[in-house]
Image (cartoon, rainbow, N blue to C red):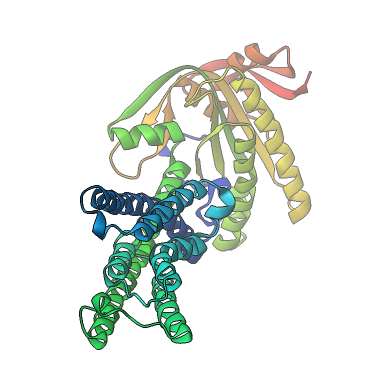
Amino acid sequence: MSKIDTTDWVENFGPPARELGDTPPLNLKADYEAWRDRFTLSRMKLGLWLAFFAFLTFSLLELTTFLFNRQHFNSSLLLTQIVVQLIMLAGIASLQIPAVRRQPALIFLGLSWSTTLLPQLRATLNGIAQPDIIAWSLMFFGQATLNPVRWPLHLTAQLGVFIYYFGVNAALKLQVKPEDMPVAPAMLYLYLFWACVTCNLSVYLYERLAKAEFKARRALEAERERSERLLLNILPPPIAERLKQDPQTIADSFAEVTVLFADIVGFTELSSRISPTELVRLLNEIFSRFDHLVERHSLEKIKTIGDAYMVVGGLPESHVDHAQAIVEMGLDMQQALVEFNLKKDRDFQIRIGISTGLVVAGVIGWKKFAYDLWGDTVNTASRMESHGIPGCIQVSESTYERLKGLYVFEERGEIEIKGKGKMKAYLLKGKA
């Protein structure tokens, strides 16, 4: 492609080094379960503190009874409440242990049963069957409200209470005291049945909603990440961030950068002999190799058009070795094309032009954003390429002056440059 004019270029973005397909697929099931475990642990900590203070209030009430109405004081009840409080504090402390945190289901069941079954154990030791309808209902509804996920776990916690109550009472033939059964047994059991149904249905419906919301949120995050990666394929990260913060025209002046233009010699002629699909496939493979070199040398690819390639060093974040990095990029591009030719049995050559100096870089317009460069340095680099020699890297005098001690150059003399007149040019031969 000869006589490149940067004003006529059409952008072709999307270097394979940052392709969208590189993102691993989402594992929604595992991610949701991990979130659910974190949520459960967080809510259990809150529930433990709430249960601790709840039992503390009942203990204080029992102590008040001891002080002012001693004939109704129940020492075993106070002792049970104190034991439960100690278990709550132990549970809170245990949640800081990594090995314990990895078993949220066991923690849930253990803490649930410690609250509901300890009073039953006290009653069993006293030789009575004592249904604690208030404590059971409060616990079941509290769990469903504070930790509305994993409804099978809630069901297991409830069944554990009833299996103990009916199983132990039947095995030991314990009787319920009349004062502990203010209503008929059938009505009590029906009440508990519907309390459990309500709790489990509530948790089940909430968890379905939570799963749907989690899936939608992850899909939104994935789409946002995809859009972010697409934007980063088009714009340098600092420029993309600025554009997101303030979608206005971005134009920055850089006192010194180095610009490289490359053109694959003979590619235009080849396009008349092979199919467009094969042509694009070959070009994509070549430019993909170049894209990886851009990443390796920490440069910024600007754009491509047809069989031409443009890259710059020293922006959007400046660094002092931009000229050396661009020259190394040019040498590696030559080697990459040699390897490509050997692999594909082709004989392509590349013509490269480089120049160093002042440029203006930025994003203009409001549709199909593109990061581009303007200035005499850009035009000079383009002319260095278009007036260069196939298989050679031609640099301007400005680049030569910065690298003449590090690389071997051959002075080509003054050459006539369209729109510029006579200019000195040098051919890069290799490292010094």
Which residue lies at the image location 51% right of the left edge and 64% below the top edge?
Answer: 106
Residue 160 position (above or below residue 325)? below
Quarter containing the N terminus: top right
Front one among 179 and 145: 179
Task: Kindly tell me whether residue 223 is visible in this rendering.
Answer: no
The quadrant holding residue 361 is top left
Front one among 274 and 124: 124
Residue 38 placement (x, y as % from top left) = 45, 54
Residue 261 position (above or below residue 187)? above
Quarter containing the C terminus: top right
Which residue lies at the image location 62% right of the left edge and 27% below the top edge?
Answer: 326
Which residue lies at the image location 53% right of the left edge and 53% below the top edge?
Answer: 101
Task: Kindly tell me whether residue 24 is visible in this rendering.
Answer: yes
Residue extending furthest toward the front: 71
Residue 253 position (above or below residue 37)? above
In the image, taking residue 32 as reference, residue 21 lies left or right, namely right
Residue 34 placement (x, y as % from top left) = 49, 58
The quadrant holding residue 123 is bottom left
The quadrant holding residue 320 is top right
Residue 334 position (above or below residue 136)? above
Which residue lies at the image location 35% right of the left edge and 32% below the top edge?
Answer: 242
Front one among 2 and 47: 47
In the image, taking residue 4 as reference, residue 251 lies left or right, namely left
In the image, taking residue 236 as reference, residue 307 lies left or right, namely right
Residue 238 placement (x, y as % from top left) = 43, 31
